[in-house]
Image (tube, rainbow, N blue to C red):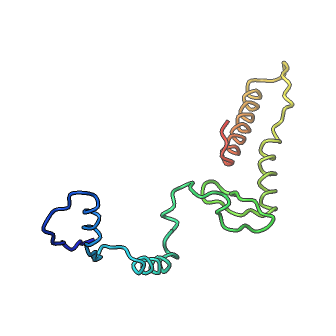
Amino acid sequence: MALKRANFIVEPRNPLEWERFFESIGVEPDEDTVTAETIQDNAIAAVALQADAVTTSKIEDNAVELEKIAQLTANRIVGRTTTNGNAQELTPQEVQDLIFTQQGNIGNASTAHVLNGTFDDAEVEAALNALGTKINAILAALDTLGLTA
């Protein structure tokens, strides 16, 4: 704010004289002064920009809480049917397919291995290779779900 310079003959010497001096000074707002009118003008401009004020690119990763996510369709679970990417609404059938696919990868490993004198090296090697394949399938299924073993 710009202050008008007051002309006084004697400089104020005590608080009462200073108070009178400050009361006599005229105050004129300058161009940087905030007034009710500038606040209102800025508020109107802010409302006009509000729709574009926050864009997806301006939101930090993992900054949105679950309750701030868009409304979900009833009977849906948030997840993914493929690796990596944005969350999706999964239908009950997609959830069931995911569960049964993962169970199938894990549940069909044979545990009926009997070692006896009739196994030759090739048969033992084939059984171990099949077991390794099943273990790799389990690890891949866990990785798809974001889990590590």
* Residue lying at 27% horizontally and 71% vertically, measured from the top left: 1
- Along the line of sight, the residue nearer the viewer: 27 or 110: 27
Residue located 45% across and 79% down the image: 40
In this view of the protein, which residue sits in the foreground, 149 or 62?
62
Q: Report the number of numbered marks.
A: 0
Q: Is residue 115 above or below residue 96?
A: above
Q: Residue at x 42, y 81 (%)?
A: 41
Q: Which residue corresponds to the image point at 61% horizontal and 60% vertical from the top-left? A: 86
**Residue 70 position within the rendered picture, expressed as x and y whole percent measured from the top left:** 66, 67
> In which quadrant of the rendered image does the C terminus lie?
top right
Relative vertical location of residue 122 with respect to residue 147 in this rendering, above or below: above
**Relative image position of residue 111 (x, y in whole percent):** 84, 32
Which residue is most to the top? 117
Q: Position of residue 23 (x, y in %)?
A: 29, 70
Left or right: residue 127 compared with residue 21: right
In the picture provided, is 17 more to the left or to the right than 129? left
Using the image, determine if residue 22 lies above or below residue 125. below
The x and y percentages for residue 38 are 39, 78
Quadrant in the rendering for residue 105: top right
Is 108 on the left-hand or right-hand side of 6? right
Single out the residue that lies furthest toward the left.
9
In-front residue for pair 48/81: 48
Determine which quarter of the picture holds residue 139: top right
